[in-house]
């Protein structure tokens, strides 16, 4: 009996050992695939984060009003377009073909059109090449090496072509969505950031002084530090609005000051008519950008020049964002005296009208009684 039991146990033990070995091998293979997916996801995220300064420099030059906005918003536009998102209900498991890249491609095409000179905004290609030197410090050495000969080009069109080719390489290496098992791993391990995003948004937009730090201060200083470089049109028009004593300014007066004192733009024409047309376009772009940013509100009305001209009736009202203009003590005292005199005059008018009403009621009362 013992010999029979031992003979029965030996095949069973061999089968259990083989099954355990197969399970261990399958577990090791699964861990290897998971490790590869995790490494690919981590590398993708690192490449994307390292390229954010390059994206920021490109957007600031391609869009006329982007530089004065919050840097976090500019970078989040790229992150929102490329960041993996769970598949919609009923769409099934995530697959490489289900990744939507239309928004990222659309934003990239808009920037490339501006770089080619096909938009209304003029791109300073030499300034962009200079900014890319510092912005590309976290990229691969091969990409950084290609910027050195590019900066030495004298032909502006050749520099535009080389910059487009360089940005295409950056897009292929850094601005591609995550696909395959790495995307599935990223989605399964990524925590729900909905509550965290709401708390971050509350901190960004709920703290005091944020508007002055994020919008007004960069808008007042411009792209370059104070006293260095050419002031951009957006900053120049905003400074003209800031030096106005009141809350509003005539658009005609702003245009005259801009036309007389604005710094010359790149490729400005020599003839007076063409120069005025170019400056008028620059002034219009700056005013439209300030309106989109919400720092001024245009309103119609009688102009300072008696209504002559198409823009004579338009005025630009600044948004105060809680700021109040406090004049001198003499003007404040005069305003207080004028307010007191106006109040006394209104009180006298009210008393006089009340007395007239009482007299009329007294005269009408006997007739009513009769």
Image (tube, grey):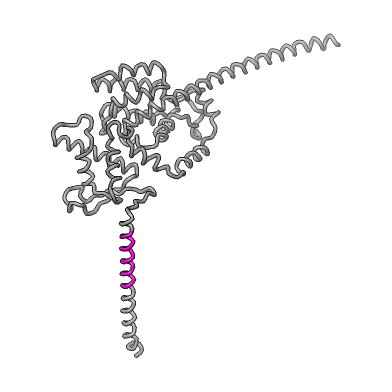
- Identity of the residue drawn at 79% across and 9% down: 7
Which residues are the magenta region? 333-349
Q: Is residue 340 magenta?
A: yes
Residue 237 appears in the rendering: yes
Residue placed furthest toward the right: 1
Residue placed furthest toward the front: 330
Left or right: 78 with respect to 337?
Answer: right
Q: Is residue 331 magenta?
A: no
- Identity of the residue drawn at 32% across and 29% down: 111
Residue 359 in the image, given as x and y percentages of width and height: 32, 82
Res. 234 image quadrant: top left
Residue 314 in the image, given as x and y percentages of width and height: 24, 49
Res. 280 image quadrant: top left
**Magenta part mainly helix, strand or loop?**
helix
- Identity of the residue drawn at 51% across and 30% down: 92
Residue 106 appears in the rendering: no
């Amino acid at each position: 009996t013992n010999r029979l039991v031992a003979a029965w146990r030996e095949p069973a033990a061999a089968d259990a050992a083989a099954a355990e070995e197969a399970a261990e091998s399958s577990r090791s293979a699964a861990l290897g695939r998971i490790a590869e997916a995790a490494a690919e996801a981590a590398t993708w995220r690192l490449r994307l984060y390292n390229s954010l300064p390059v994206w920021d420099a490109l957007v600031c030059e391609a869009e006329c009003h982007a530089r004065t906005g919050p840097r976090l918003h500019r970078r989040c536009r790229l992150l929102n377009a490329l960041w993996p998102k769970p598949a919609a209900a009923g769409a099934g498991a995530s697959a490489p073909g289900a990744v939507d890249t239309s928004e990222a491609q659309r934003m990239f095409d808009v920037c490339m059109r501006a770089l080619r000179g096909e938009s209304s905004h003029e791109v300073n290609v030499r300034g962009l090449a200079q900014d890319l030197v510092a912005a590309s410090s976290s990229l691969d050495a091969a990409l950084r090496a290609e910027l050195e000969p590019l900066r030495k080009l004298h032909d502006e069109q050749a520099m535009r072509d080389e910059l487009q080719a360089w940005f295409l390489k950056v897009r292929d290496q850094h601005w591609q969505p995550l696909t395959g098992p790495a995307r599935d791993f990223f989605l399964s391990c990524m925590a729900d950031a909905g509550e965290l995003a709401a708390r971050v948004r509350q901190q960004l937009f709920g703290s005091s002084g944020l508007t002055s730090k994020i919008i007004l201060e960069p808008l007042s200083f411009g792209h370059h530090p104070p006293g260095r470089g050419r002031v951009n049109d957006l900053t120049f028009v905003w400074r003209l609005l800031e030096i106005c004593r009141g809350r509003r300014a005539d658009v005609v007066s702003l245009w005259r000051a801009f036309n007389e004192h604005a710094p010359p733009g790149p490729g400005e024409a020599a003839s007076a008519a063409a120069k005025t047309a170019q400056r008028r376009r620059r002034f219009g772009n700056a005013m439209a950008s300030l309106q989109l940013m919400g720092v001024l509100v245009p309103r119609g009305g009688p102009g300072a020049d008696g209504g002559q001209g198409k823009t004579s009736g338009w005025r630009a009202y600044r948004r105060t964002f809680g700021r109040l203009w406090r004049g001198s003590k003499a003007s404040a005292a005069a305003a207080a005296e004028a307010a007191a005199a106006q109040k006394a005059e209104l009180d006298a008018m009210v008393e006089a009208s009340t007395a007239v009403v009482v007299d009329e009621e007294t005269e009408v009362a006997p007739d009513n009684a009769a």
